[in-house]
Image: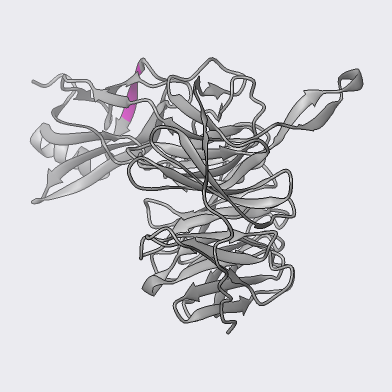
Amino acid sequence: MTRPCKRPSRASWALIAGAFLLLTLLPAGRAAAEGEASLTGLRDGTHASGIVAGGAGSLWFVGYRAGGENVLGRVDSEGEVSEFELGPSAGFGGGIAIGDDGSFWFTETGAGEVGRVTPGGAIEEFALGFPGAEPNAIVAGPGGTLWFVEEGADRVGRIDAGGIDEFRLAAGARPTGIALGPDGALWVTEKGLGRIARVAPNGAVTQTFALPDRGSRPHAIVLGPDEALWFSDESGPTIGRITTAGAIEEFRVPGENGTRELALGADGNLWFTAGYAIGTISPAGVTGEPACVSNACDLPVTALARGNEGSILFGTGYRALKAGPAGAQVSALSESGFVGEYFPPDVRIRLGKRATRVEDGLTTIALSCHGGSAADACGGWLRLSAKLGGRRVLLDQHRYRLAPASGRRLPLLLGARGRRALARNKRVQVEITATLFDGAGAKRSFVLQARGRR
């Protein structure tokens, strides 16, 4: 165990006015989306690497300055920015999370430290036990603990009132993401080995799960609404899902960029970053078109988190691509990054009202999508069930996807049990449900009857 070394606060908060902009998220290469993003400009040279929602409509971020300092900051509901200079950044920022005690805990990747802001406003910093540890992602764990990864030392760490414990992973693991699973264990992305590790609360690695493509570079990981763990992949346009039993499923997302940051939204979607854009994927694996966070599509998204009132928070980095000689792409430093908040547009689905007839066990149902944009099409599950033998039985289900402001008739198959019930009774009372990604949606009862019978 390494005992924390607490440092006094080095300076008072510096208050600056944040530039506040309203932009429309732009699907990459597509027309503008309907959702709005508010962008707050940070102090010159400041760029966010981690972000989290605070109270009273505020957000907190951790990042770095081009001059070489780590920065902790807060943006209130009026867009006023407060920044505090921490230790040397070496060009890295860190992650940030809220503990059970209401404190904001953060990592300083370049300085090799973990810190916190207490509910009373005091800032404390704790040195880690290994040089070059490079702590990054941090998450609240069981029993009031905070867990974090050390990419440079191939370790995970745990901090609580008793001090800091650091636990060894496999050599070359390069852990970058960590999440608390529904089983009470910590799930860690081992980017250097192309696998996911399960770490028990005592720090022991109990299982590792290699990804199907050993060239994968899993980066972030979060708990999804389906009690599975979802992870991003820097090696290509893929989002993955792993259950606590180790079953792995991977989904291709639009575009060619690898995926990096990941967050569970209030809408039940998984939100991810891919280069200069933010995209969504549902628990059913249905993806939305990624959208850029700036009109010029030149701000890389470097932080992502669930916000207040259904929003998604994001931060941007410092590199913008500009055309160089002979059309070559060169990197250039922007003056500062931004933190922002995006409110997804409201999307609703509707089911047709009239009863339908059945022929050869097949029927169709009208389904329409209202509102939204190219980045927020309707998608989810269409299910057909009936009450047979005193209990409700699922007869058919399948995934669907509809463009916004569109409709179509979708097929449903009764299955053997439904056909037998229809043959006996000539009419069957059924319930058809169409759900969006978060489970909300439309539900309607119908009487299905064999073709030609009334």
Q: Is residue 367 visible?
A: yes
Question: Which residue is at a point 59% across and 24% down the rendered structure image?
Answer: 294
Left or right of residue 300, residue 12 in this image: left
- In reply to whether residue 69 is colored magenta, the answer given is no
> What span is in magenta?
407-411
Rendering coords of residue 358 (x, y %): 22, 26
| Farthest residue, direction right | 326
Question: Which residue is at a point 70% across and 63% down the rendered structure image?
Answer: 193
For the N terminus, which image quadrant?
A: bottom right
Residue 149 higher or lower than 346, as above or below: below
Rendering coords of residue 85 (x, y %): 61, 52
Say how the picture is coloured: one colour
Residue 273 higher or lower than 248, as above or below: above
- The prevailing secondary structure element of the residues shown in magenta is strand
| Farthest residue, direction bottom | 1
For the C terminus, which image quadrant?
A: top left
Question: Which residue is at a point 58% across and 76% down the rendered structure image?
Answer: 5
Rendering coords of residue 79 (x, y %): 45, 33
| Farthest residue, direction front | 12
Left or right of residue 26, residue 393 in this image: left
Residue 59 higher or lower than 446, as above or below: below
Left or right of residue 88, residue 374 in this image: left
Q: Is residue 177 visible?
A: no
